[in-house]
Amino acid sequence: MQPLSKEEKAIILHKGTEAPFSGKYENFFEKGIYVCKQCLSPLYSSKDKFHSGCGWPSFDSCIENAVKEQPDRDGRRTEIVCAKCGGHLGHIFRGEGFTAKNTRHCVNSISLSFKAD
C-alpha cells in the first residue's frame, strides 16, 4: 500500500468527498490509465473518461472487475470502491444520459493516480 496524506486518508479511508471542480483530473484528458492512489491497481482507461460538468472526473466504464459497487451509508446512492483494497473512489449513477452507456462513475481525483500511455 502507498502512504497516504491526511487529506487522502479522509477521502480514501473515511469516505469523504473532495470539493467539486477542485480535483486535478476533472478537466484532464491525456491518454493512459487511472490507478488506485492507495494500491496502484488499474481502475479506468482514459478512453472511458468524459466531461460531465458535475465537478469530478467521470467515466462511463471501469476496467473489468476493478471497481466494486456497494450501498452508500446514506442509503440513497451506490458507492464505488477499489475492488483490490476497498479504497473509496466515489459514486456511480445510472440513467443520466451523458453517454450511450448511460452510466457515470463520479470519482474523486484524490483517489486516483494517472499513468500515461
Image (cartoon, helix red, strand yellow):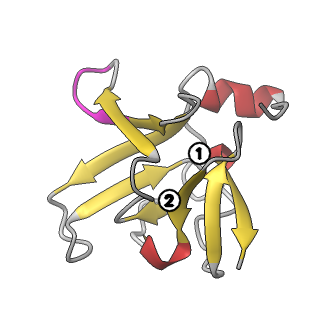
Q: What is the tally of numbered marks visible in this picture?
A: 2
Q: Position of residue 6 (x, y in %)?
A: 80, 26
- Seen in the image, is 13 located left or right of residue 20? right
Q: Measured along the vertical axis of the image, is residue 55 above or below residue 86?
A: below
- Seen in the image, is 60 located left or right of residue 96? right
- Seen in the image, is 50 located left or right of residue 17? left
- Crowd around label 2: few <14 · some 14–19 · many ≥20 (10 Å): some
Which residue is at 42% across, 64% downward? 59
Q: Measured along the vertical axis of the image, is residue 45 above or below residue 79?
A: below
- Crowd around label 1: few <14 · some 14–19 · many ≥20 (10 Å): few
Any part of residue 50 in sight: no
- Let me know if residue 76 is in the magenta part: yes
Q: Which residue is mark 2?
A: 55
Which residue is at 50% across, 50% downward? 107
Q: Which residues are magenta?
A: 74-79
- Let me know if residue 73 is in the magenta part: no
Secondary-structure class at tag 2: loop
Q: Position of residue 32 (x, y in %)?
A: 64, 75
Which residue is at 59% across, 45% downward? 19
Amino acid type shown at disc 2:
Gly
Q: Which residue is mark 1?
A: 19
Q: Quadrant of residue 48?
A: bottom left
What is the chief secondary structure element of the magenta stretch? loop
Q: Quadrant of residue 1?
A: top right
Secondary-structure class at tag 1: loop
Which residue is at 73% across, 67% downward? 115
Amino acid type shown at disc 1:
Ala
The answer to whether mark 1 and mark 2 are in CB contact below 8 A is yes
Q: Position of residue 72 (x, y in %)?
A: 33, 25
In the image shown, does 86 or 24 lie closer to the viewer? 86
